[in-house]
Image: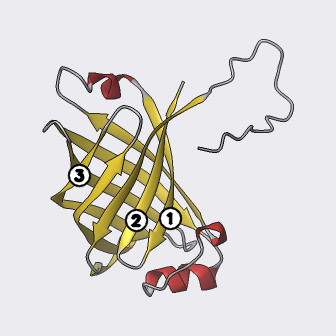
């Protein structure tokens, strides 16, 4: 794993600067979006999540089929993402994930993504804030943190890199 440093710019004396702990890489398999149409918040669609996998230093397993990413496109062209899905760890524990995110980029890039084309992730912004609901036991630490992720959208999948803010 490559470790990178971040230029924080001017930080006030005494500021508590957060750190990041890598949690996992998550890849979800997706079906084609179901377009609902124009709604009061924008163009609404739902993307079924059919499964996947995740792996990190403290957890690994598979995505449970049946989740969905409810998305809408704002007037400025950005997509707001609201996904709810289940993870099943290798030792059989179910963990619910709610992921609220934003995907944005130049209009041509967003058009290509919406059309299901492969687009280099460096051409657009894709960030989200997952929250976890885990049962008591080995993974309950997920209930006690704030998380962020970076993402990449592919024609039939999405890949997320999840970090805990320390």
Vertical position of residue 12 compared to residue 27: above or below: above
Residue for point 65% across, 77% down: 106
Q: Secondary structure at mark 3?
A: strand
The residue under the point 82% across, 21% down is 12
- Asked if marks 1 and 2 touch (Cβ < 8 Å), the reply is yes
97 to 139, vertically: above or below: below
Q: If you read the primary sequence from the N terminus, does the residue marked by circle 3 or circle 2 appear first?
A: 3
Mark number, residue 62: 3
The answer to whether any part of residue 16 appears in the image is yes
C-alpha separation, residue under disc 1 versus residue under disc 2: 6 Å
Badge 2 element: strand
Quarter occupied by residue 51: bottom left
Q: Nearer the viewer, residue 38 or 140?
A: 140
Who is closer to the viewer here, 8 or 34?
A: 8
Q: Residue at x 29, y 55 (%)?
A: 53
Quadrant in the picture for residue 134 = top left
Q: Which residue is mark 1?
A: 152
> Mark 3 packing: few (<14 Cα in 10 Å), some, or many (20+)?
many
The disc, 1 or 3, on the residue closer to the chain's N-terminal end is 3
Looking at the image, residue 129 sits to the left or right of residue 3; the answer is: left
Q: Are marks 1 and 3 in contact (CB under 8 Å)?
A: no
Closer to the N terminus: mark 1 or mark 2? 1
Q: Quarter of the image holding residue 17? A: top right
């Amino acid at each position: 794993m490559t470790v990178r440093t971040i230029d924080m710019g001017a930080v006030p004396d005494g500021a508590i600067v957060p750190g990041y702990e890598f949690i996992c890489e998550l890849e979800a398999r997706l079906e084609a979006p179901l377009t609902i149409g124009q709604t009061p918040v924008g163009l609404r669609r739902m993307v079924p999540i059919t499964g996947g996998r995740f792996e990190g230093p403290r957890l690994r397993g598979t995505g449970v089929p049946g989740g969905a990413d409810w998305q809408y496109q704002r007037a400025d062209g950005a997509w707001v993402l609201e996904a709810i899905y289940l993870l099943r760890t290798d030792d059989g524990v179910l963990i619910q994930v709610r992921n609220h995110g934003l995907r944005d980029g130049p209009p041509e890039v967003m058009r290509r993504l919406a059309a299901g084309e492969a687009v280099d992730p460096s051409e657009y912004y894709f960030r989200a804030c997952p929250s976890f609901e885990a049962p008591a036991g080995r993974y309950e630490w997920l209930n006690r943190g704030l998380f962020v992720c970076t993402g990449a959208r592919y024609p039939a999948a999405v890949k997320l890199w999840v970090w805990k803010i320390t």
